Amino acid sequence: MNILLVGSGGREHALAWKIAASPLVRRLVAAPGNPGMAAQCELRDVAATDVAGLVALAREIAADLVVIGPESAVAAGLADAAQAAGFACFGPTAQAGQLESSKAFTKAFCDRYGLPTSAYAVCGDAAAAKAALDRFEPPYVIKADGLAAGKGVVIAPDRAEAEAAIDDAFGGRFGAAGARVVIEEFLEGEIGSLFALCDGKTSMLFGWAQDHKRAFDGDRGPNTGGMGTYSPAPVFTPAVVEQTRERLAEPAFAGIAADGAPYRGVLFVELMATAAGPKLVEFNVRFGDPECQVLMLRLESDLVPYLVACATGRLAGMPPPAWRDDAAVCVVMAAQGYPDKPRSGGEIRGADADFGPDVAVFHAGTKADEAGILRAFGGRVLNVCARAPTLREARDKAYAAVDAIDFPDGFCRRDIGWRALG
């Protein structure tokens, strides 16, 4: 098979790593990719939102499958264009992608189809948003309506910070994504990430993990796109998994199909395990980043048949995926200043070292300069991942590799997996 993989982050590097291991793959091309991905595939300098360019590239390489990594490509309508051009595509249409691209859409969707989630208010200006705060108790959850690379959420402990977050959103901090805000009830519980595949009709669970959203140890600091993950996570008891499937994943697939947009791809259900059962925090219409990284390390099955089955309506004939018994941990090395003003250009040495068969370093925000020196280019720069028979061993392996990488401008959290390990 010839496969076109779209994206350039750590999630896409992990997907490339797993896809390249499949005996079914003849040619793997990533667009635009990153320096680390060059070890697994060919790179082409076509942006993830250049829909016409990507369709042309799919034609050039005679792609048997297009795999969409980032949400930006979904929102740009890549799946629609690829399918119209005759290519099988793993990834939902732009209409189905509204489950992530608009939080206001998702809240109304939950109301329409009875999915459990928090109380909310959708506001189109700062005055309305500040008035809506009267309906909620602190802490206040303020979200940009649109795509903000995982950084459009502020949890404000008091009214003053909530109003400041509202002013920031409407003042342009998140660009067009902040043209509306959604104010939500704060949910008490433990957060988790569950994934499910769908081919438009048939769905299947596809693993779970737990992310660490805050920038600093102890869950302090601003929200980020994710500072590290681990899998399996104790929050996912059999009851929570089954309730999430019954109350969130399957109703979402049925509802979006009823809306005229059958879902093909992976749905990321971010949930809060509350005393009343799991409630939706938000949907994402792609693999999580950095959750994908630990899932790929634990996935025993060949990934490619599942991607093809989703794209071609054949998931019903697939067995449940097989998972390693090992635990996996991902530690994100970010640039100083992330998530607000990450420092770009810092030199990185040692990321390509051989850390052993159970450690993988996925590039998330890197570029090679003219001299071939690897440098930071973005907020989250490297994903250092490891697997082992126990979570503690996996975490120790990951941090040993982190400590061996020379990245003076970088930082990471030192407590990934703390809910399970203390």
Image (tube, rainbow, N blue to C red):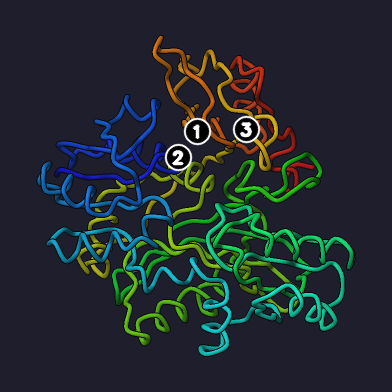
Pointer 3 local density, CA inside 10 Å: few below 14, some 14–19, many at least 20: many
**Residue marked by disc 3:** 334
Alpha carbon of mark 2 to alpha carbon of mark 3: how far? 13 Å
Alpha carbon of mark 2 to alpha carbon of mark 1: how far? 6 Å
- Tell me the kind of residue under disc 2: Gly
**Residue marked by disc 1:** 365
Pointer 1 local density, CA inside 10 Å: few below 14, some 14–19, many at least 20: many
Tell me where residue 94 appears, x and y as whole percent.
36, 68
Position of residue 36 in the picture relative to residue 271 (left or right): left
**Residue marked by disc 2:** 9
- Tell me if I can see residue 386 in this picture: no
Q: Quadrant of the N terminus?
A: top left
Q: Is residue 158 above or below residue 114?
A: above
Residue beneath the point at 67% across and 37% down: 341
Q: Is residue 350 above or below residue 243?
A: above
Position of residue 230 in the picture relative to residue 4 (left or right): right
